[in-house]
């Protein structure tokens, strides 16, 4: 089990590059390091959360299409700003919302939980195995040479982001392409994950208070996944990054 000092040290190394804030000064990242999790299959509690998320999404989409939801629209603009086509590579929030009509995926209780929180709060949210990181998480604009391990048709392969693409990475390579589009296989949550990193992404019109509320909701639900669950949050904004000299 990791101690709190280790979790805090890991988060302290997290960075959002100035070039990303130059693209979207309103961007904020809430990093959440969590230890003491007990992985397991989907259960009644996560099923209830997913059903609530599906119902909430259906109500939000009752009189407008997904792309007109304010936060989804903001992410589409952000994708266009670095050259991505949002109709082809959808941000994680939009991808989930588009699945609510037929049903959100049921994967395991950890993944189900953060997917439900993402939809309920309309915030892109990703989860990864913290122990599989080499170095701290960094959000940068890619050079195009960084390796990204993925799979297509069951075949493992290495891809590379487009130059200028916004990517999360560590010292080994890309951990998530196009800001919050697709996660690498290397750091993905697994059946034995007990220490995880969650990244919650926000653009205007999502406020800092709404972002914090989503993180608090996630923490509240995660605490039931083990008696020793401990969580450490860190909010990175353009202002905090500037003050820290990032």
Image (cartoon, rainbow, N blue to C red):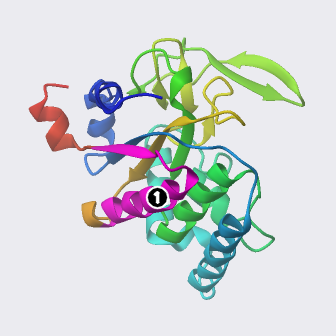
Looking at the image, residue 13 lies above or below residue 210 = above
Label total for image:
1
Give residue 152's position: percent from left, percent from top: 83, 29
Q: What range is drawn magenta here?
A: 210-234
- Is 47 situated left or right of 84 in this image? right
- Of 137 and 110, which appears nearest the observer? 110
Give residue 2's position: percent from left, percent from top: 43, 28
Residue at 77% of width from left, 17% of height from top?
157
Prevailing SS of the magenta stretch = helix
Looking at the image, residue 42 lies above or below residue 194 = below
- Of 26 and 149, which appears nearest the observer? 149
Residue extending farthest to the front is: 227
- Of 140 and 105, which appears nearest the observer? 105
Residue at 20% of width from left, 25% of height from top?
246
Find disc 1 in the rendering and name its residue.
218
Residue at 59% of width from left, 80% of height from top?
56
Q: Is residue 132 magenta?
A: no
- Of 146 and 81, which appears nearest the observer? 146
- Is 49 situated left or right of 191 in this image? left
């Amino acid at each position: 089990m990791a101690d709190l000092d280790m979790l805090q040290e890991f988060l302290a190394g997290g960075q959002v590059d100035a070039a990303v804030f130059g693209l979207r000064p309103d961007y904020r990242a809430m990093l959440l390091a969590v230890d003491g999790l007990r992985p397991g299959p989907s259960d009644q509690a996560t099923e209830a959360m997913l059903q609530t998320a599906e119902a909430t999404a259906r109500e939000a989409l009752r009189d407008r299409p997904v792309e007109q939801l304010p936060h989804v629209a903001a992410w589409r603009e952000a994708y266009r700003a670095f050259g991505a086509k949002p109709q082809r590579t959808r941000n994680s929030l939009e991808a989930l919302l588009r699945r609510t009509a037929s049903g959100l995926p049921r994967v395991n209780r950890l993944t189900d939980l953060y997917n439900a929180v993402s939809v309920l709060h309309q915030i892109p949210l990703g989860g990864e195995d913290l122990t599989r990181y080499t170095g701290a998480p960094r959000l940068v604009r890619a050079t195009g040479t960084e390796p990204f391990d993925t799979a297509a048709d069951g075949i493992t392969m290495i891809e590379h982001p487009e130059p200028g693409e916004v990517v999360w990475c560590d010292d080994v390579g890309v951990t998530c392409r196009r800001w919050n589009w697709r996660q690498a296989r290397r750091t993905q949550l697994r059946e034995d994950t007990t220490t995880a990193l969650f990244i919650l992404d926000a653009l205007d019109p999502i406020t800092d208070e709404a972002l914090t509320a989503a993180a608090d909701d996630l923490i509240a639900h995660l605490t039931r996944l083990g008696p020793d669950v401990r969580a450490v949050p860190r909010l990175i904004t353009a202002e905090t990054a500037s003050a820290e000299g990032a």
